[in-house]
Image: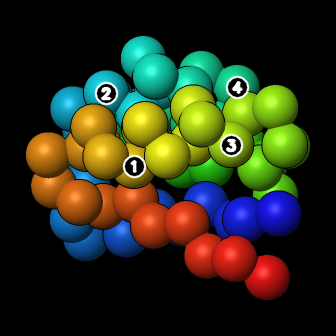
Amino acid sequence: MSRPLIDANRCEGHARCVARAPELFDVDDEGVSFVLVEEVPAHLADAAREAAQACPERAISLTDD
Ligand code: F3S
């Protein structure tokens, strides 16, 4: 299982993470992404990786336990 982390200092609100994985990410009123889960469910592992790679600011990291 991996844990998604957002670097709020890098996030610019592009919302590509939300488009790729709406089950995992959302954007708050100030345009900063946040994670909706503690751990990425196995069936969303590919979506999590795609979301991280889609972020132009490289604000998303996935840490393995
Ligand atoms: Fe932020 Fe990147 Fe998502 S800039 S809103 S973490 S695509």
Q: Is residue 30 visible in the rendered structure shown here?
A: no
Dot 1 or dot 4: first in sequence order is 4
Q: Which circle marks residue 14 in the picture? A: none
Dot 4 or dot 2: first in sequence order is 2
**Which residue corresponds to the image point at 39% horizontal and 49% vertical from the top-left?**
52
Q: Is mark 4 within 8 Å of ligand 1?
A: no
Q: Which residue is mark 2?
A: 16
Dot 1 or dot 3: first in sequence order is 3
> Do the residues bearing badges 2 and 3 touch, measured as CB atoms within 8 Å?
no
The answer to whether 15 appears left or right of 27 in the picture is left
> Do the residues bearing badges 4 and 3 touch, measured as CB atoms within 8 Å?
no
> Disc 1 marks which amino acid?
Ala
Q: CA distance from mark 4 to mark 3?
A: 11 Å
Dot 2 or dot 1: first in sequence order is 2
> Disc 3 marks which amino acid?
Ala
Q: Which residue is mark 3?
A: 45
Q: CA distance from mark 2 to mark 1?
A: 9 Å
Q: Which residue is mark 4?
A: 23
> Disc 4 marks which amino acid?
Glu
> Do the residues bearing badges 1 and 4 touch, measured as CB atoms within 8 Å?
no
> Which element carries disc 4, helix, strand or loop?
loop
Q: In the image, which is nearer the foreground, mark 2 or mark 3?
A: 3
**Which residue corresponds to the image point at 42% horizontal and 17% vertical from the top-left?**
19
Q: Quadrant of the C terminus?
A: bottom right
Provide residue 54's location: percent of width, then percent of height: 27, 37
The answer to whether 56 appears left or right of 31 in the picture is left
